[in-house]
Amino acid sequence: MNVTAPLEATDFVIFGGTGDLALRKLLPALLLRLRDGQLPTRTRVVAVSRAGLDDAGYRDKVRGALPEFVPGVTSGEIDDFAARLEHVCLDVDEPDDWHPLGDRLRERANPVRVFYLAVGPALFGTICHRLDEIGLVQPSSRVVLEKPLGHDLASAREINDSVGEVFAESQIFRIDHYLGKESVQNLLVTRFANSVFEPLWHATAIDHVQITVAESVGVGSRGGYYDSAGAMRDMLQNHLLQLLCLVAMEPPTQVAGESVRDEKLKVLQALTPLEDLDGACVLGQYTAGLVDGAAAPSYVEEVEAPSRTETFVALRAEVRNWRWAGVPFYLRTGKRMRERCSEIVVAFKPTPHPMFPGSEGTQEPNRLVMRLQPDESVRLHLVAKEPGPGGIRVRPVSLDLNFSQAFGAPSPDAYERLLMDVVRGNTTLFMRRDEIEAAWRWVEPIIRGVGARRPRPYAAGTDGPAAADLLIERDGRSWNEDVTR
């Protein structure tokens, strides 16, 4: 039974309230939390945008959008939620536009006020300072910053400095929705609540680790942003490095407060600088192909301009500490891949001696596979004897924990969990300033080093360029192909 603790009444102020993120993720998450009674009736949602909408116009817009993004919710539930919505038309750069927002929020004082900045990072500092100027920043206020937080270390520091002039670090929530996924949190539980794994979680037992975040979609409407960012900035610097930290970090004193973030920072600081870029990093860009049997255009066709922006990156990283010395971490991410799949594979070392040398079948090293999407699950791959008389036949089998089957309900969206953690003031699953800057400090030299490279082409609907296979095969390993999934 999923029990949710009630929270304080909150003002959610969403800058970019008519944008894709608000309509697709933020508003559906709030609707579901309100419907389930976790947020009290005095909670309200104030959308801020430049769209010339009044409250009624915005509510109509949301009513039209939500059925697509919240299947199974009734029209009555949508109407109840829409009645809580308000809209303020505001141009961030116009000081006089801000007073109506201040007047609106001061009409009714809720204990907690959350400012969600679902806008470009160039506006983060300006918005925070304007909020302070009109007296809307209180000790109980929080600000949520969407990625990307800058495009390099210098710009990330500039944003952090500007926001930090208004909000204390404890009030700043730098969101990475991957950390809100149930399966990612289950990674922590798998490691630290089961005594069978932690004694094996080091270089003497683990051969290597793979982290894959593959998307079958292209850049779509995000072409303008993506062409200036690429896979390295859009995915590797944040999502993949955060997952690496959760796999590699030392046990915290408790999974709460600053303990987790302290240990993640140590991992980022221990990453070995990537010097052999030719041998340890592969960039790719998708060409036209087939995805799920349908024709898919090339990246150049989607952005409608010649481009050397990478849509795929694979690299070999190492964590330079006692626990992980000599264990490679293979990271890869790409768009227009064969399937949508995010997973972490912990590959254990093979048995030291072949006890069944004359047996038929395949003996494979054990693997722990944590699937983050689309079907959240944990699988432990073992080798077992196939039933039958005569000689010994062995084959790989798996112990499979599928979360929706085990707990009788699909996992909630990551934003539902993360938004409620913001209201609680719980920063555990959010990135701290020093984490962000440590990640940029490691990634930025790689971006500079491969800047002149032309990405290798790969057809849409495949697993990326062939060079990515060579990167891991050069070490006598291969990317995970889970035949039982």
Image (spheres, rainbow, N blue to C red):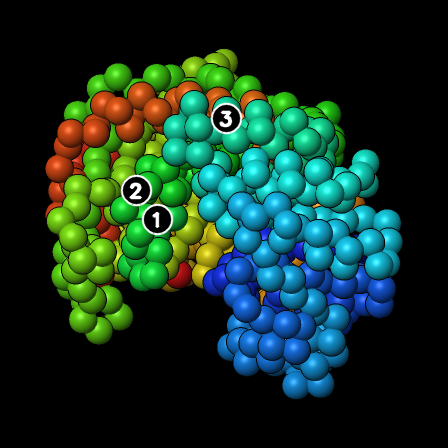
Task: Check disc 2 and give the amino acid type.
Answer: Ser
Q: Is residue 475 left or right of residue 11?
A: left
Q: Name the residue under label 2.
A: 228
Label 1 – label 2 distance at C-alpha = 6 Å
Q: Mark 1 points at which residue?
A: 225
Task: Check disc 1 and give the amino acid type.
Answer: Tyr
Q: Is residue 354 left or right of residue 170?
A: left
Q: Is residue 141 visible?
A: no
* Quadrant into which the C terminus falls: bottom left
Residue 316 on image: x %, y %: 30, 29
Task: Check disc 3 and give the amino acid type.
Answer: Glu
Task: Choose top left, top right, bottom left or bottom right for residue 274.
Answer: top left
Label 2 – label 3 distance at C-alpha = 19 Å
Question: How packed is label 1: few (under 14 Cα within 10 Å), some, or many (20 or more)?
Answer: few
* Quadrant into which the N terminus falls: bottom right
Q: Regarding mark 3 in the picture, which secondary structure is present there?
A: helix
Q: Disc 2 vs disc 3: Cβ atoms closer than 8 Å? A: no
Q: Regarding mark 2 in the picture, which secondary structure is present there?
A: helix
The residue located at (84%, 67%) in the rendering is 41
Question: How packed is label 3: few (under 14 Cα within 10 Å), some, or many (20 or more)?
Answer: some
Q: Disc 1 vs disc 3: Cβ atoms closer than 8 Å? A: no
Residue 174 on image: x %, y %: 58, 39
Task: Choose top left, top right, bottom left or bottom right for residue 341.
Answer: bottom left
Q: Disc 1 vs disc 2: Cβ atoms closer than 8 Å? A: yes
Q: Mark 3 points at which residue?
A: 158
Residue 265 on image: x %, y %: 56, 23
